[in-house]
Image: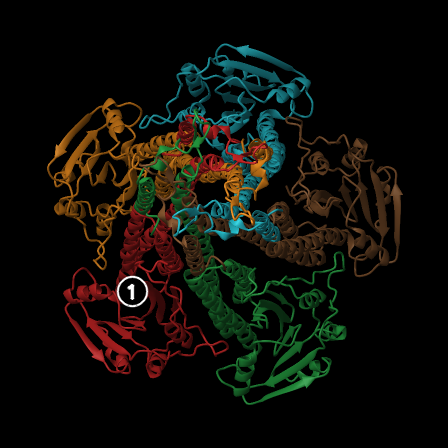
Chain colours: A cyan, B brown, C green, D red, E orange
Amino acid sequence: MAKHSKYKRKHKHYSLPEAGSSPGVIYIAKDALEPVIKIYKYNSEFYEVSELHNIEAVKNIIADKRFTYWIEVKGFDSRQLFETLAIDFNVNKLILEDITRTYQRPKMEEYDGYVFATSRMLYFDEAKNMDNIQVSFILMDNALFTFQENYEDCLEPIRNRLKAGKGNIRIAGSSYLMYALMDIIIDRYFEILGQWGEDLDAIEDRLFDSPDKTVMFDTQVIKRNLIGVRKVIWPERDKLNDILRSDSPLITDQTKMYIKDAYDHCIQIIDMVDSLKELSVSNIDMYLSFISNRMNEIMKVLTIISSIFIPLTFIAGIYGMNFAIEDPATGKVLPKNMPELYQENGYLYTMIVMGLIAVLQIIYFWRKGWFK
Amino acid sequence: MAKHSKYKRKHKHYSLPEAGSSPGVIYIAKDALEPVIKIYKYNSEFYEVSELHNIEAVKNIIADKRFTYWIEVKGFDSRQLFETLAIDFNVNKLILEDITRTYQRPKMEEYDGYVFATSRMLYFDEAKNMDNIQVSFILMDNALFTFQENYEDCLEPIRNRLKAGKGNIRIAGSSYLMYALMDIIIDRYFEILGQWGEDLDAIEDRLFDSPDKTVMFDTQVIKRNLIGVRKVIWPERDKLNDILRSDSPLITDQTKMYIKDAYDHCIQIIDMVDSLKELSVSNIDMYLSFISNRMNEIMKVLTIISSIFIPLTFIAGIYGMNFAIEDPATGKVLPKNMPELYQENGYLYTMIVMGLIAVLQIIYFWRKGWFK
Amino acid sequence: MAKHSKYKRKHKHYSLPEAGSSPGVIYIAKDALEPVIKIYKYNSEFYEVSELHNIEAVKNIIADKRFTYWIEVKGFDSRQLFETLAIDFNVNKLILEDITRTYQRPKMEEYDGYVFATSRMLYFDEAKNMDNIQVSFILMDNALFTFQENYEDCLEPIRNRLKAGKGNIRIAGSSYLMYALMDIIIDRYFEILGQWGEDLDAIEDRLFDSPDKTVMFDTQVIKRNLIGVRKVIWPERDKLNDILRSDSPLITDQTKMYIKDAYDHCIQIIDMVDSLKELSVSNIDMYLSFISNRMNEIMKVLTIISSIFIPLTFIAGIYGMNFAIEDPATGKVLPKNMPELYQENGYLYTMIVMGLIAVLQIIYFWRKGWFK
Amino acid sequence: MAKHSKYKRKHKHYSLPEAGSSPGVIYIAKDALEPVIKIYKYNSEFYEVSELHNIEAVKNIIADKRFTYWIEVKGFDSRQLFETLAIDFNVNKLILEDITRTYQRPKMEEYDGYVFATSRMLYFDEAKNMDNIQVSFILMDNALFTFQENYEDCLEPIRNRLKAGKGNIRIAGSSYLMYALMDIIIDRYFEILGQWGEDLDAIEDRLFDSPDKTVMFDTQVIKRNLIGVRKVIWPERDKLNDILRSDSPLITDQTKMYIKDAYDHCIQIIDMVDSLKELSVSNIDMYLSFISNRMNEIMKVLTIISSIFIPLTFIAGIYGMNFAIEDPATGKVLPKNMPELYQENGYLYTMIVMGLIAVLQIIYFWRKGWFK
Amino acid sequence: MAKHSKYKRKHKHYSLPEAGSSPGVIYIAKDALEPVIKIYKYNSEFYEVSELHNIEAVKNIIADKRFTYWIEVKGFDSRQLFETLAIDFNVNKLILEDITRTYQRPKMEEYDGYVFATSRMLYFDEAKNMDNIQVSFILMDNALFTFQENYEDCLEPIRNRLKAGKGNIRIAGSSYLMYALMDIIIDRYFEILGQWGEDLDAIEDRLFDSPDKTVMFDTQVIKRNLIGVRKVIWPERDKLNDILRSDSPLITDQTKMYIKDAYDHCIQIIDMVDSLKELSVSNIDMYLSFISNRMNEIMKVLTIISSIFIPLTFIAGIYGMNFAIEDPATGKVLPKNMPELYQENGYLYTMIVMGLIAVLQIIYFWRKGWFK
């Protein structure tokens, strides 16, 4: 069933916390990737990217307050990395757990000296399935740390803007950078929702052209993905709202104005998700009504053909019977018990009667609208 | 399927922001239309419309505070136009993005010296499909800018009222003009909802007269349109409420009284949308029950005819069998193994039995109510 | 379909505002009725009804503060009537529009010197369809205006109580009169909901006795009516709540105590509507399950009869075949290829086998529970 | 249909107010019962029950403040009784109407010198139908009046506890008595919900053993009852919350602590109602899927038998045809047009072919999983 | 039906309060277990577990404030145990009732000198059914009492952490211990929900491979379990929120920080429950559409075979009729009434016609897409 469908079913497995482990424990998964650390150092005139081998150096680097820094950490296979964060930057252990246990809802928390936030970044994997991974942010005075467990991302346009120095990305500080990253992650939702919208339209086309079981299957896959997005986008909205209402000096008023813009996008995504969900429900409804209609059509064919030919076959059966008369005198069998059989035009008359019955039935079904 | 339906399916495509672009960037679509700028200059005694070639002149024109001005901009193919707005009137770049990215929800935002608002204007396109486009407002002291990306609108009655000087449209200032435009846009919803209401009634008539697949299809189209309107009318309501509660000196108390009226209309539209949605769900329910009923009828015909004639055909089949007796003495075949065949009235009796079976079955089905 | 149903489908048409008309315009429909104006003048000792030809006189009449006045206006075909209201009693033009555009939700608004409110009065028209019309109230110091567009109402008991002087209706002032009228309009809902409750019970009875398509149809009609009532009763509740919380000196504390009572009735109506809606959904569910069950029964009849007789007919067909042997010596056809046919009891054995097959199948179906 | 079901359908009729009657009118139904008045006089050391013939004496009795009094009124056929309440205890006329119009939602209202409250008491009537009647409370300083329109109740355990002097029921005053009565009325809900839970489990058992139409019917009855309970228990919760937040000196802090307990029970009932409702929806879903499955099975039997035997019968029909050759020389009919009939093993071969066809079809259906 | 399903239906029975019993009564069930009391005495350097025979000794033990104590009570068959609690630790009787009536929703209540809270602990019983039991907490200054009615629990990891002295469990006081226990109980939800998630995935696999009735059954079982969890996890969330907002000095700020973490877990569980519920609804939808599709396929087989062979059988029947001509001259029967029978290639032509009819029908069904 549905083997040729575009979508593959995928079972999602969460790396859930081991029950009863202490809180605040850094979690390094078995298949964690080697950490890759890049540091983007920039101000209005300057821009430089370098790769670091360990995070110890960062503290000294970012002490130079003339620049803003983006420290991008990808891959978590280094307990020491997180411990350095705890020691050098006084980051709460619960946050380190939240960064490494990558199934957090989008949220934002203010701490003394830094702000912690998470987003969920969507992407289609090679099998065209949607997935979402966690991007964690630690916002400091003139630095922004970001963390994600694998190497793939959709942040390239931001790097390009940083490099090009377009807009006010190089002059508006670390909180604007956080906004820019969060915003591009949200923009990715639009793209993927747009993809699904087109898929749903294509499914609808199939519904009208040649519906089959894949309609149900594909629509259900999209519906589940939409439910997945919905689960993520509502806390995203709350997170942005928390940032808007935050008193933290780390988040500038200018950044808040832009966050308001991202918040509006978030609402639009919620609208879009709801619309697409309605669309998929509508597709399912139409598919079910299509099945019922098809059933009706199948039954109509059967009923018309059976109703016409079964009675005719019966008549033919009658005149196939072998009733005969035994001549009481001679004891011989005389084939005359069924007089119709020996009338001159018996066969003709029978055929005419059969034809009439068939025609009457066809008229009956015609008037009932069964041929439409 | 549904080829003769009044409605055509249409796939909606949004011009979504390019992921990762800077915020506040003016977006000029490839198929953007040549801008047409009209300025309506009026007060209680004076009324004049003129077309402008560029927007630079506006700043000087509206400096004359004895008049109220409506600057109507249609078509966005001019980056310079929006840049002039930013420079001459100090309009925020994020607003210029919102004006040119025409998929905003209705909203209202107060800024220093002006108020920004958007509405969504409904219309049926030539294929009878609903669409809605964005109308953006920038309300200033004695001027109102409106922006829409194409040339078609439903604002003609307002222009007529301006020209005629009826009511207090010429004396109540720019905020009243904004109200009047917003109100006529809302009134358009009534019209279109009324159209759908009539369509749903017509579909219901078809449901009782000659239901076919188009019932499902057309109802789904209307239901989706209703969902589309619902998505737009709730933020519209919020927008009007924001205007009502606004402290901005640009919005006069008199205007607010009228906005309250528009707000009431908005609530009535929400009510209407909900009613029509219930109506379409009810149509779908009745259609599905109609399909089931029709199935029952089809099956009843098949069952009645099969149940009557299949047993009769069997009886005819029996007396069509060729059982015979071989005379052990002569080796000759004597056709007497089936004695019924040689009884004097065998044929007659058989016909009577068959008739009885048929009559009994008809009575049985009659009493089961299958002929109703 | 459903021709003998008690209910008739009715398409509702609203007299919607002409898009773009000025706000505050008095709307006189083409089929507006001749206004009939009655004035009830009363106090604890006095009661008098008189009919007025125009409303100009009212101002002088109600200047006599020793009495309370109920000015009842039915029929709107007089623009001058409403203009007099605007001039003599300083009534806001938007209110006059609300009175004459009779599709307002129940609402209450306080103005300087008077209170404006609307109710929606239910009635069954001659075709047993529910309809609701608008009753508008303008409450003044010692006078109450009521407006409705046609002549029919359910207010007779109030007139009787006024005449009889029962209870405190003659001594409690104009706000109590407004309460009494609003309350009797609400009581009417109970009556009509009770009627529907009985109808739903009768439909349920039909469901168990002889369900047919009218079950679906009638239930849908009632369900829609309930949706109609629900749309009206929620704003009614809000209106009463607004009156309860109002600071207007026109509404006495005593009246508020009674309004609280009407508010409780309103809540009970909401409960009743919800219960009846559940009842109608339950009726529809049971009808659909009835259709499915009936289908099962139809198919069981077909399957039992076909399954028994089709194999038997096949056996009869076999022994109706004409296989024979050609005697290679004589070239004569000897009918002996099917030896069963020439066994002495071949016919009998065949009949017994057929009987056995039939009996076994009947046992099979019996044990499957298909005869229940 | 459903004649052997445990449940009987019952149509509920409300004694609704006569439209337009004055508010605050005592309503004595035609079938009102003779009032039975009992007074329980008690304190920590004393307990006495006596029956009163009229309520006039109560005022004097309860003047003795050393005792607490419970005045229990059952049966409303005495207008004078309620008038005495109004005169002797200054009870508001609207309350008397609320007591005698026994379709009030649970509510609590504070008045000067007393508190008015209502509960709804559930019971199964003799036909196992749920019903609920109103119990009204008037709480005074050292006395509690209760009113119910018929004689049956579930309050016996409270009387026993009063008599036995167990717990602090005899020392905690009139508000504690009111709590105890309300609490036992709520406890009754648990009992009845428990009964329905068991019924639903029994229905579920039937679903797996021998589902028939009563499954649908009985589940619908329980679902409606649950809806009925839900309608009553939410205002009950609000009532208890109102009592908790009440400032009335009549309700002691100790009583409030217990009311909190009753409030928790109320929440648990709401949870239970929701769970049972889910259970009944699940039963209905499973029943519908059972009908569909059964349909599938019926159709499979029909299809297998028809598909196997109809083609075979056709083959038998072919060899039952009477095609022959007319010898052009002699004009005699030679039965040789169908050569298969005269092959030596024609009959055998035909039977083998038929057998093969049947076997192939059986294999086909087997592999399709139709025999499972 | 569904006999081989992994799940067993289980009817839940609550030990509901006896209606009308006094509040605050300790409830000892008939099958209550012998109490087992353990006391864990620990501080940063010390750790000791001992089993107590009765609870009287506890008061003296916990007087030593240098240590923190966890008094774990399992099994309730001792009225004296609870009475000692009431006397020695001044615990409110209503709390004792709540502890022993083990159907409380999760809640938290502050009292003078202690905090009372309950959680619901999930586990799969041996039959793989989910159940949940109540764990009650009484938090005091340096001691935590926990109560559960049976011996099984999922708290072993906490005991291990206490023993190992890992993390700050031995130094953070009694409120941290309460947090740790509550948190592990919540973590258990993740585990069980994960189990169900895998079960739903396995059911989905079955849906695509070989769907049968167990799909419906198993999904319904999981859906009900999810509803059960949902009922418990929402009040759990509220409880944790109450603890977060509590002013009680017994709950340290550090503990609150961790409780915030548990609260986040709670929200994630709610998300997971909702997702899984959507998944089960989706499974049910797909199962129902599968049944409908299967019906269609069954009917298609029947219709194709019947439509092809019934008309053919009719034709065969025609030529099986025995129409003949009686020679008026000789009175002999001449078999020539049906001339087709005596044409030279009559049989061949008939077979060709039959073949054509069959081929045309096959083409017709092919083009309708019925063979797909």
Q: Residues within 10 Å of mark 1 (few under 14, many from 20)?
A: few
* Residue position marked by numbered label 1 in the rendering: D127
Q: Is residue B223 above or below residue C341?
A: below
The vertical placement of A66 against D234, above or below, is: above
The chain letter for the residue carrying disc 1 is D
Task: Describe residue D262's horizontal placement relative to residue A324 as left or right.
Answer: left
Q: Of C64 and E311, which appears nearest the observer?
A: E311
Q: Position of residue B84 (x, y in %)?
A: 80, 35
**As drawn, which residue projects farthest toward the left?**
E53
Residue A268 picture location, percent across and down: 60, 38
The residue sitting at 44% across, 45% down in the picture is A322
Q: Does residue D236 appear in the picture of this structure? A: yes
Q: Position of residue E336 (x, y in %)?
A: 56, 42
Residue A155 as seen in the image, left or right of residue D164: right
**Which residue is most to the bottom?**
C45
| Helix, strand or loop under label 1 | loop
One can see residue D63 in this view: no
Picture residue at 24% right of the left edge, 33% below the top? E126
Q: Nearer the viewer, residue B227 or B323?
A: B323
